[in-house]
Structures are given as C-alpha cells and as structure tokens.
Amino acid sequence: MILYGERNPAPNPRRVRIFLAEKGIDLPETRVSMREREHKSPEHKARNSLGQLPTLELDDGTMISESVSICRYLEGIKPEPSLFGATPLEQATIDMWIRRVEFQLMTPIGMYWRHAHPFTAALLTQHKDFGESNRASTAAVLGWLDRELSDGRDYLAGDYSMADIVGQTTLDFADFVGLETPPDLTHVAAWRARMAARPSAAA
Ligand SMILES: N[C@@H](CCC(=O)N[C@@H](CS)C(=O)NCC(=O)O)C(=O)O
C-alpha cells in the first residue's frame, strides 16, 4: 500500500497518521507537496479526481480517498484496537460524532480558511465577510461542544475513537488558522489535553 499525504498543518492526512500510530501500523507516507500544487497535478488527480489528500493506493492499484474512509478500510484489515466501535450502538455513536465534527465544526473552520485567511487568498475569490462570519459560527459550535462534554465523559463517543481523532485534528487546524478554542471552554480544553497527551499526537 502507498499512502499519499502532506505534512502538518494539513489536517486530513494527519488523521490517517494518528490512526496508524494508534493502530501500530507501519505505513510511511509519500508526500505530495501542496505548496508545489502537486495535489492538483494530473498524476495525483489520476489517484483522486478531486485533487485532494490523503489517498491510499492498494497493492492492486485501487485508490481510496477520504480520510475517514481510508481509516475504515485500515480498521477492517486490522480490527484491533477498535477505533470505529464493536457493537452497533458503538459504531453508530462514533459515526454520529464523526459527522457532527465534520459538518458542524470543520465546515465553518474550512470556510474561514478559504474565505478569510491570507494563505488561501491567491487560490480563489474570497468572500471576506462570509469568511469572517465563520469565526462566530465556530465559536458557537465550540460552546455547544463544551456543553456536550460537561457530562463528564472523557471522549466524544464513549471510549477513545476515530471521532476523537477527527476532532483533535480539526481543532489543531483551527488553532493554526487563528480560530483558537477560548480558554473558558474548560471541558473542550480538558478533552483536547487528553488527546495531546497521547504519543500519536506527534503524528
Ligand atoms: N473530506 C476529505 C477532505 C480532504 C481535503 O480537503 N484535504 C485537503 C488537505 S488537508 C486538500 O487536499 N485540500 C485541497 C483541495 O481541497 O483542493 C477527507 O477527509 O480526506
């Protein structure tokens, strides 16, 4: 297998690296430089027609994109330790939290990055007012997340899972773009500290 990815702060390839570290799977990443726009090259678009990272190439040449889908595949071939849940309820709860993080949290952070951040200004026509509006949207979702975590649970979906990896990478990327978690959100801060203490956080 060949894993195509990019260094931090790119959050989606990092999800897979953290997952691999947690699973104890040794799969080095082949870098596709986003700075050099290699992810939009014909060579990479032949792997992933969206020109995005990460992409996993299987030994028979099959390509899998989407970070969560890549991790689901890897979970299938190495089920332990389980990061997508064992029972139907665990699996549904983890899936619910992955979707909530992606739709509720990653969406405004991604829109801020695309429409308000100077690093992306050369890549698209920015709608600055819309971009800036995502600062308040992100803050509102973080407040909701803090209330969710105030019930005393250590992880988003029960035990540590893929949902936490998606959340961790999303909020670390939010820090990078300038949407830091407000310090008064103590439950989110404690949950993030739990993730940051795991050796996989270095991925
Ligand atoms: N939903 C995809 C998102 C992939 C994605 O947006 N990756 C970024 C790098 S972190 C990328 O390739 N951005 C370039 C683009 O979207 O054109 C996933 O989870 O893998």
Image (spheres, rainbow, N blue to C red):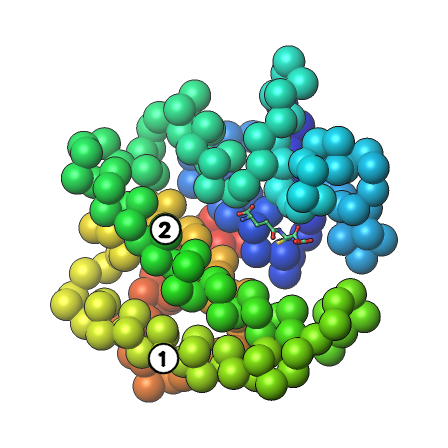
Are circles 1 and 2 on residues that touch, CB within 8 Å? no
Disc 2 target residue: 98
Figure check: 53 above or below 128: above
Please provide percent x and percent y for residue 130: 57, 80
First in residue order: circle 1 vs circle 2: 2
Q: Identify the disc placed on residue 140.
A: 1
Secondary element type, mark 1: helix
Please provide percent x and percent y for residue 87: 18, 32
Q: Quadrant of the N terminus?
A: top right
Q: At 65% from the left edge and 82% from the top edge, which residue is drawn? A: 128
Secondary element type, mark 2: helix
Please provide percent x and percent y for residue 106: 48, 62
* Count of number-bearing discs: 2
Label 1 to label 2, Cα distance in Å?
18 Å
Q: At 70% from the left edge and 32% from the top edge, which residue is drawn? A: 47
Figure check: 70 above or below 6: above
Q: Mark 2 belongs to which amino acid? A: Ile
